[in-house]
Image (cartoon, rainbow, N blue to C red):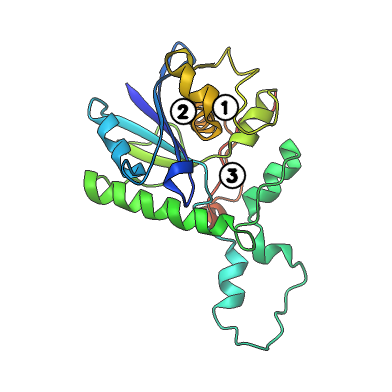
Amino acid sequence: MTALLGIDCSTDPKKTGLALGELKNGLVNIIRCDIASKRNPPIRVIDWLHDFEKVIIAMDAPLGWPKDHGIQLSAHKAGQAIHIKDMNKLFRRMTDVEIKKRLNKQPLDVGSNLIARTAFAALTLLDQIRQITGQPIPLAWSPNEKDQWRVIEVYPAATRIAHGAKDESGCLQGLEEMLDCSAVASIVQTSKDAADAAVCALAAADFLLGRAVAPKDKETAYIEGWIWAAQKN
């Protein structure tokens, strides 16, 4: 059985949602769900995974930066012009453009918004999980790769839209046929972060089932990261 670990990332542990799901007959059953805290930091989620041989970690945070952002700024000095025709290429990744085009939802620009701090926190958490578990946890690019533990970037809003559900943080309405949160009803009803973590777990299932759209330009995706979201119904 593969664990579907959804993490709704934040710089604040109290806003970090965690959800553990199992895929059975095409339905994602959320068996554990919680909100982290200073006393119960997000890294404690690894205690949930002892009974699983395989794990897909689905993180709601950018896991990379725009390719041109690094190229242009690496040699830049204060006061100099930045010679680039399309300013969006400094701040917006290929996957962000694709999500807007395909699902009409614009992810936050990791190069220019506070989401960059969330990205940093997510990458730090991922590194902590690697160190404690001893698992390399590479980014996943295909459902059938051999690594036991893998990670993908997801975006709950994109997953909701792709499945025809309401585009609202914390909303699970319209996802009932694919996502069963009855075992954790109290927490997902009271916490948007917990509910979004459950949707992250659904996005992990979309990836494993081949419903998520893969990048056409893999070389750029390897540098910038890729949001795995299903094709719109």
x and y, in percent, of residue 25 in the image: 45, 10
Q: CA gap, disc 2 to disc 1?
A: 8 Å
Q: Quadrant of the C terminus?
A: top right
How far is disc 3 from disc 2 in space, using C-alphas? 15 Å
| Secondary structure type for disc 3 | loop
Kind of residue at badge 1: Arg
Q: Quadrant of residue 111?
A: bottom right
* The N terminus: image quadrant: top left
Q: Which residue is mark 3?
A: 215
| Labels in figure, total | 3
Of helix, strand and loop, which one carries label 1?
A: loop
- Calculate the distance from the C-alpha at mark 1 to the C-alpha at mark 3: 13 Å
Residue situated in front as seen by the camera: 112 or 204: 112
Specify the amino acid type for callout 3. Answer: Pro
Q: Position of residue 191 (x, y in %)?
A: 52, 30
Residue drawn at (57%, 27%) of the image? 211
Q: Residues within 10 Å of mark 3 (few under 14, many from 20)?
A: some
Going from N to C along the chain, the mark reached first, 3 or 2, is 2
Per the rendering, the mark at residue 211 is 1
Residue type highlighted by circle 2: Leu
Which residue is label 2 attached to? 208
In the image, 209 versus 119, the foreground residue is: 119
Tell me the mark number nearer the camera, choosing from 3 and 2: 2
Q: Residue at x 31, y 43 (%)?
A: 39
- Residue at 38 percent across and 36 percent down: it is 145
| On screen, residue 6 above or below 151 | above
Indicate which disc residue 149 carries.
none
Q: Secondary structure at mark 2?
A: helix
Residue drawn 59% across the image and 61% down it: 66
Q: Is residue 111 above or below residue 35?
A: below
Are circles 3 and 2 on residues that touch, CB within 8 Å? Answer: no
Is residue 206 in sight in this rendering? Answer: no
